[in-house]
């Protein structure tokens, strides 16, 4: 089944403790991105990657890092999480070019930083 | 990307057609209209997209006006599982990022 898989689904952590949220897709998509969703603010893009070793900032990149060493994986790294990064996170991927099937989103990771 | 305007919420009876409008009066010639939906706290789901012709797939139909300044997403026989926030997004495919607005909360009731 074509899908984007995020792990973990739920995570509670403490301020300052480095964490990584993994994202993997099995559709051979070049493009991948990370979003966060907060009440009243909607979905906002954090980082995106057009292809392997090519990443760029989205609308809210502060406090996050990403890497794209291989096509299928696009981990989101929080080096020193803070409570304002408590949010629902989504990873997404799509074909490059015509985008005939739209973006495919993962099921989400609910992160709580205390 | 062109800005879109959608109603905040809509209601629909189960089994009836749900018609969700979207205004995009500043759309440019190479921008497509995309529709996504998000069922509570799940990842957004792609529904359909189009440039200027009406489109239909297994999920929905998309009607775009001749001047392309507005469109309507039609769910022909709404079910309770169609209750979700529906986002209308106008953009150039494959290049610009996918930017979500506030969308329309569709509530399908028995």
Image (cartoon, coloured by chain):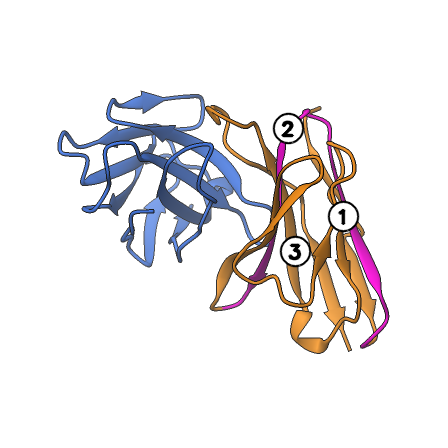
Q: Chain of mark 1?
A: A
Reading the image, the residue beneath label 3 is A89
Give residue B22's quadrant in the image. top left
Q: Is residue A67 left or right of residue A49?
A: right
The residue positioned 19% from the left and 35% from the top of the image is B68
Q: Is residue A44 left or right of residue A54?
A: left
Disc 2, SS: loop
Q: Are marks 3 and 2 on the same chain?
A: yes
Give residue A78's quadrant in the image. bottom right
Is the C-beta separation of discs 3 and 1 under 8 Å? Answer: no
Q: Is residue A36 magenta?
A: yes
Q: Is residue B76 left or right of residue A61?
A: left
- The mark total stands at 3
Disc 3, SS: strand
Compared with residue A42, is residue B23 higher up or lower down, i.e. above or below?
Answer: above
Compared with residue B63, is residue B96 higher up or lower down, i.e. above or below?
Answer: below
Give residue B102's quadrant in the image. bottom left
Q: Earlier in the sequence, mark 3 or mark 2?
A: 2
Q: Residues within 10 Å of mark 2 (few under 14, many from 20)?
A: some
The residue positioned 35% from the left and 21% from the top of the image is B56
What is the magenta range? A15-39
């Amino acid at each position: 089944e074509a899908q984007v898989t995020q792990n973990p689904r739920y995570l509670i952590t403490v301020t300052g403790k480095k964490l990584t949220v993994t994202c993997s897709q099995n559709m051979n998509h070049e493009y991948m991105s990370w979003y966060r969703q907060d009440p009243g603010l909607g979905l906002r893009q954090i980082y995106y990657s057009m292809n392997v070793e090519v990443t760029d900032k989205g609308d809210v990149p502060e406090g996050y890092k990403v890497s794209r060493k291989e096509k299928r994986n696009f981990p989101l790294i929080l080096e020193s999480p803070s409570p304002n990064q408590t949010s629902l996170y989504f990873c997404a991927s799509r074909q490059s070019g015509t985008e005939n099937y739209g973006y495919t989103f993962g099921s989400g990771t609910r992160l709580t930083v205390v | 990307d062109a800005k879109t305007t959608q109603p905040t919420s809509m209601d629909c009876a189960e089994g009836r057609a749900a018609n969700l409008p979207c205004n995009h009066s500043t759309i440019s010639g190479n921008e497509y209209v995309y529709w996504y939906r998000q069922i509570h706290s799940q990842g957004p789901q792609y529904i359909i997209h189009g440039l200027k012709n009406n489109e239909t797939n297994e999920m929905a139909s998309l009607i775009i006006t001749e001047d392309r300044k507005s469109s309507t997403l039609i769910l022909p026989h709404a079910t309770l599982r169609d209750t979700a926030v529906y986002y209308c997004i106008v953009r150039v495919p494959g290049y610009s990022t996918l930017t979500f607005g506030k969308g329309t909360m569709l509530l399908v009731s028995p």
